[in-house]
């Protein structure tokens, strides 16, 4: 039987949900982008409106944290749940642009995530009748699921966007002969999710991976969670002309802005990574005028995950 609890929730004090005024601007842009894509693809307008209202409600709570006169506590009962079929539309919404604007078997990909109930978590509001999903996290074995159309299309996408000669060989190896030892680390959420939840989300995931190596019913399934590597596919903001010499010593713009703070840690721990251009149109704002939304692929050794977890706890606790 699975050892993990089916839910976890906390009463969270209101505080900034990202770590700087600029990062908060990035967060709001990302939220607007998510809502835009959901409304474009939602089967019913009413469902899109409900999702947008929930995002705006959480965003108003985060906005109030920036008011110096506000010192109250907002009840935010975010709960951790095992994935289940009812989460299909919520998870699909979060992953709508996972592979940029590629037309692929996203529904099949979501089915894989929801079908793997012993490893993976969705975050929702406690006792929420609308069942809105605010976050999903899982790790899928690329070898175990290699015959699924969505995984074949994902591999094709990754190989097509890799143009760095010193990286493509490593990528081919992880997607090919080493795929049985590779976990695709999928973590997507609305940006307003309280950062205090992040260490618990990742701790739960990697605990589940460890338990699955002992608790899964067959030897093949147990072996499928003996990961040696993780691949992460995500998005960051890259400063335009970042490879050129800065025009002024007063220019303090960071070369890279991580939308998800934990991915800066993963990037530093990665054994290799590469950036790739996105076809998706970027939301234009003054704060982001010097930045371009960019895709990133990272490969991380499983032996470095404990260090990642420790650094993530430190980052959140000190913020």
Image (cartoon, helix red, strand yellow):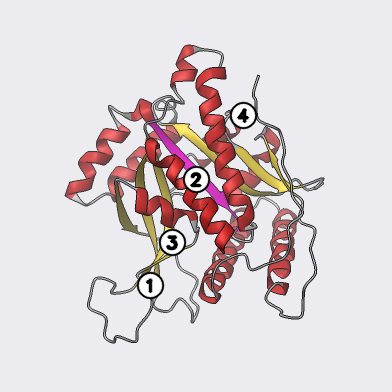
Nearer the observer: mark 4 or 3; the answer is 4
User: Tag 3 or tag 1, which sits nearer the N-term?
Assistant: 1
For the residues labelled 1 and 3, say whether their Cβ atoms are less than 8 Å apart: no
Kindly identify which numbered label has been placed on residue 157: none
The residue tagged with tag 1: helix, strand or loop? loop
Residue lying farthest left? 165
Kindly identify which numbered label has been placed on residue 117: 4
- Give the magenta part as a residue range: 182-190
Nearer the observer: mark 2 or 3; the answer is 2
For the residues labelled 4 and 1, say whether their Cβ atoms are less than 8 Å apart: no
Instruction: Say if residue 136 shows up in the picture.
Output: no
User: Tag 3 or tag 2, which sits nearer the N-term?
Assistant: 3
Location of mark 3 (residue): 280
Dot 1, crowdedness within 10 Å: few (<14), some or many (≥20)? Answer: few
Separation of residues labelled 2 and 3 (CA atoms): 31 Å
Judge by depth and name the residue closer to the eye, 102 or 77: 77
Location of mark 1 (residue): 254
Residue 185 falls within the magenta-colored stretch = yes
Dot 4, crowdedness within 10 Å: few (<14), some or many (≥20)? Answer: some
Separation of residues labelled 4 and 3 (CA atoms): 31 Å
Quadrant of the image containing the N terminus? top right
Q: Quadrant of residue 155?
A: top left
The residue tagged with tag 4: helix, strand or loop? loop
User: Tag 2 or tag 4, which sits nearer the N-term?
Assistant: 4
Judge by depth and name the residue closer to the eye, 111 or 6: 6
Q: Quadrant of residue 81?
A: top right
User: Tag 3 or tag 4, which sits nearer the N-term?
Assistant: 4
Nearer the observer: mark 2 or 1; the answer is 2
Q: Position of residue 24 (x, y in %)?
A: 57, 71
Location of mark 2 (residue): 309
User: Tag 1 or tag 4, which sits nearer the N-term?
Assistant: 4
């Amino acid at each position: 039987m699975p050892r993990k609890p089916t839910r976890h929730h906390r009463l969270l004090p209101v505080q900034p949900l990202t770590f700087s005024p600029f990062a908060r601007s990035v967060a709001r842009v990302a939220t607007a982008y998510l809502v835009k894509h959901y409304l474009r693809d939602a089967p019913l307008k009413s469902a899109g409106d409900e999702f947008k209202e929930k995002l705006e409600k959480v965003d108003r709570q985060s906005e109030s944290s920036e008011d110096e006169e506000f010192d109250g506590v907002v009840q935010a009962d975010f709960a951790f749940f095992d994935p289940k079929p009812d989460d299909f539309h919520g998870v699909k919404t979060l992953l709508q642009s996972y592979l940029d604007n590629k037309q692929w078997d996203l529904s099949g990909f979501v089915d894989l995530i929801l079908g793997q109930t012993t490893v993976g978590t969705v975050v929702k509001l406690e006792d929420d009748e609308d069942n809105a999903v605010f976050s999903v996290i899982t790790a899928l074995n690329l070898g175990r699921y290699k015959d699924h159309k969505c995984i074949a299309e994902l591999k094709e996408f990754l190989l097509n966007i890799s143009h760095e000669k010193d990286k493509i060989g490593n990528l081919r190896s992880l997607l090919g002969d080493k795929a049985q030892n590779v976990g695709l680390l999928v973590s997507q959420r609305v940006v307003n999710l309280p950062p205090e939840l992040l260490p618990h989300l990742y701790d739960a995931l990697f605990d589940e991976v460890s338990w699955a190596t002992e608790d899964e019913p067959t030897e093949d399934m147990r072996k499928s969670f003996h990961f040696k590597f993780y691949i992460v596919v995500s998005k960051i903001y890259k400063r335009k002309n970042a490879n050129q010499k800065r025009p002024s010593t007063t220019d303090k713009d960071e070369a890279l802005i991580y939308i998800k703070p934990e991915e800066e840690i993963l990037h530093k721990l990665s054994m290799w990574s590469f950036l790739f251009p996105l076809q998706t149109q970027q939301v234009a704002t003054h704060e982001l005028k010097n930045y371009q939304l960019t895709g990133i692929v990272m490969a991380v050794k499983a032996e470095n995950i404990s260090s990642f977890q420790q650094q993530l706890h430190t980052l959140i606790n000190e913020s």
